[in-house]
Amino acid sequence: MFSIENPIIIAGPCSAESEVQVLETALEIAKCNKVTIFRAGIWKPRTKPGTFEGVGEIALPWLKKVKEHTNLKIAVEVALPEHVEICLKNRDIIDIVWLGARTTVNPFSVQAIADVIKGSDIPVMIKNPLNPDIELWAGAIERIKKVGITKIAVIHRGFYPFEETHLRNIPKWELAIELKTRYPEIPIINDPSHISGKKEFIPEISQKALNLNFNGLMIETHINPKVALSDAEQQLTPKELIQLLKNLKFRKQTSDNSEFLSLIEQYREQIDSIDYQLLELLSKRMNIIENIGKYKLTNNVTVFQLRRWIKIVETRKEFGKSIGLDTNFVKKILQLVHRESIRKQTKIMNGKDVPKNIDT
Ligand code: PEP
Ligand code: MN
């Protein structure tokens, strides 16, 4: 079911909306032999009330028809123990269940679901929690493993963006890589749809995941995304999906050399991600510096505060040392940041820029 050798491609609508929508989408998707699993949410845990929360059990006969007309396996999301009970009663239709990000985030919910899954052999996919806490994700895996489920996969759908980003969810690839390192036997599937939020970013995210050796992709696909009742902006048409799968470069993992390249790529992705986070933090720090500059101006206080500066250097050097950073290196970085801060604040004070190479 979840082979590590061949990429697992899952496609289907965010939500099952009608028999026609489900069947037409599935029949088009089935034309591409790369897709083996059909996804459709029938219970939709939504952030806000009053939005479409899924059609529920009435979708089961629609999914049955998908099975009758295609070779696709069927996967649905379960968010409550009752959902699992219904799926287990309908094992002729439902092949796989998955836990959504809003479920993985809550250990009580995961445990309640695990208790009902116990004794069955249904394959389970576990999405990462909304917040970037790898322990919650690992905890959910442990809870599902503990009740005897052996066919487990995880889905990386990105994390709630606390920072401004063009994406709906921040990938934080390094967390997915860390999880993969902890559970090398568990396939990891990337969900570019929920990371992207808009369909134009899906190819880039998908390729990145494949370059990082992910074991598959889950891509939301709808026969007519414009009228979709949920996640309309991020769903591809089946045609777009098939084109995307044609364009993507699926790497082979046969030679030592490609293994080496993929490892290097993973390290580089981690470095890239960390660099962007460093820059984002620096930009945040500079924004605060500007506010302080304005505040100092209205209160007629000098830009340079010696005691504060000495304390900053001392405390940071000490902390840096405790986490294995060279003291001199920490000092140099601080000096650079401080110089830029002084330049910014001086500009605010004087109403004009100062030469960048000024030594303060
Ligand atoms: C979904 O797959 O449609 C979904 C609700 O995703 P997530 O749990 O990742 O938000
Ligand atoms: Mn969705």
Image: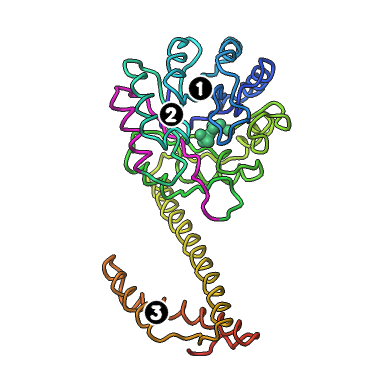
Question: As shown in the figure, which amino acid type bears the numbered disc 2?
Answer: Met
Instruction: Determine whether label 3 and label 2 are within 8 Å by CB.
Output: no
Instruction: Determine whether label 1 and label 2 are within 8 Å by CB.
Output: yes
Does 328 sit above or below residue 140?
A: below
Question: As shown in the figure, which amino acid type bears the numbered disc 1?
Answer: Ala
**Any magenta on residue 92?**
no
Residue range (magenta): 135-163
Q: Secondary structure at mark 3?
A: helix
- Count neighbours of disc 1 (C-alpha within 10 A) and say few if under 14, some if 14 to 19, many if 20 or more: many
For label 3, the residue is 332
Pointer 3 or 2: first along the chain: 2
For label 1, the residue is 75
Q: Secondary structure at mark 1?
A: strand
For label 2, the residue is 125
Pointer 1 or 3: first along the chain: 1
Does 296 sit above or below residue 18?
A: below
Q: CA distance from mark 1 to mark 2?
A: 9 Å
Does 120 sit above or below residue 111?
A: above
Disc 1 residue: CB within 8 Å of ligand 1: no
Whole-percent x, y for residue 178 in the image? 37, 46
Tell me, yes or no, if residue 217 can be seen here. Answer: no
**Any magenta on residue 149?**
yes
